[in-house]
């Protein structure tokens, strides 16, 4: 059973987090291991496994990037620890930002840090724009594999941007 089935939802790239949290509360009341303390060891283990699955599903479906990764995995388009090749143009942009980050090691210029963060935010918007409609309006069986491959490219680019943002956060 996948997380969408567990929560009674259609497969989607953008989820309603409030609805998922409400459904989580409903399901956790039925599956919490504390309700199974007076049952057999087998039933207790099953309850613990169900609750762990429920918690992992909540974590995955309430995080946009994790939801995208999960759907791409369900479709067989992303593998764990995959080494995805990004476009040379994008990698050049990332190299320039990495160089700016390296320069910041030697100077304390808050304005430069803010400028770099703004650049990352603008770049994120730029890479989201071509896939926004696909992500917002994903339909199982209607959205093509080609469109999902565009989302995959976005996912890996955003992952790279997030890594740089984390590095920058350590320098703020």
Image (tube, rainbow, N blue to C red):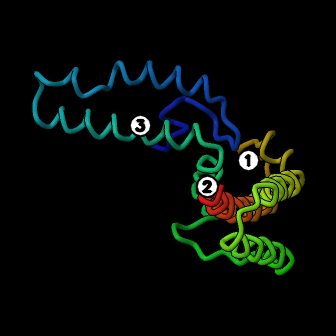
The residue located at (68%, 41%) in the rendering is: 12
The residue to which callout 2 is attached is 69
Q: How far apart, in angstroms, are the residues tagged by discs 2 and 3?
A: 17 Å
Disc assigned to residue 52: none
Quarter of the figure with residue 161: bottom right
Q: Nearer the viewer, mark 1 or mark 3?
A: 3
Percent position (x, y) of residue 64?
A: 65, 44
User: Foreground: 96 or 102?
Assistant: 102
Disc assigned to residue 55: 3
The residue to which callout 1 is attached is 141
In the figure, is residue 65 to the left or right of 26?
A: right
Q: Classify mark 1: helix, strand or loop.
A: loop
In the figure, is residue 59 to the left or right of 68?
A: left
In the figure, is residue 82 to the left or right of 102?
A: left
Quarter of the figure with residue 119: bottom right
Q: Earlier in the sequence, mark 1 or mark 3?
A: 3
Q: Earlier in the sequence, mark 1 or mark 2?
A: 2
The residue located at (14%, 37%) in the rendering is: 42
| Whether residue 144 can be seen here | no
Local packing at callout 2 (Cα closer than 10 Å; few below 14, some 14-19, many 20+) is many
């Amino acid at each position: 059973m996948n997380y969408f089935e567990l929560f009674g939802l259609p497969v989607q790239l953008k989820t309603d987090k409030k609805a998922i949290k409400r459904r989580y509360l409903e399901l956790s009341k039925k599956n919490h291991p504390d309700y199974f303390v007076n049952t057999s060891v087998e039933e207790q283990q099953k309850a613990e496994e169900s609750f762990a699955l429920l918690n992992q599903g909540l974590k995955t479906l309430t995080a946009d990037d994790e939801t995208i990764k999960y759907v791409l995995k369900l479709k067989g388009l992303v593998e764990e620890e995959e080494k995805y090749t990004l476009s040379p143009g994008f990698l050049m942009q990332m190299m320039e930002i990495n160089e700016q980050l390296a320069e910041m090691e030697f100077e304390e210029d808050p304005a430069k840090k803010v400028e770099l963060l703004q650049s990352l935010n603008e770049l994120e918007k730029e890479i989201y724009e071509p896939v926004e409609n696909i992500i917002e309006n994903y339909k199982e069986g209607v959205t093509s594999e080609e469109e999902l491959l565009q989302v995959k490219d976005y996912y890996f680019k955003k992952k790279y941007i997030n890594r740089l943002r984390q590095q920058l956060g350590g320098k703020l």
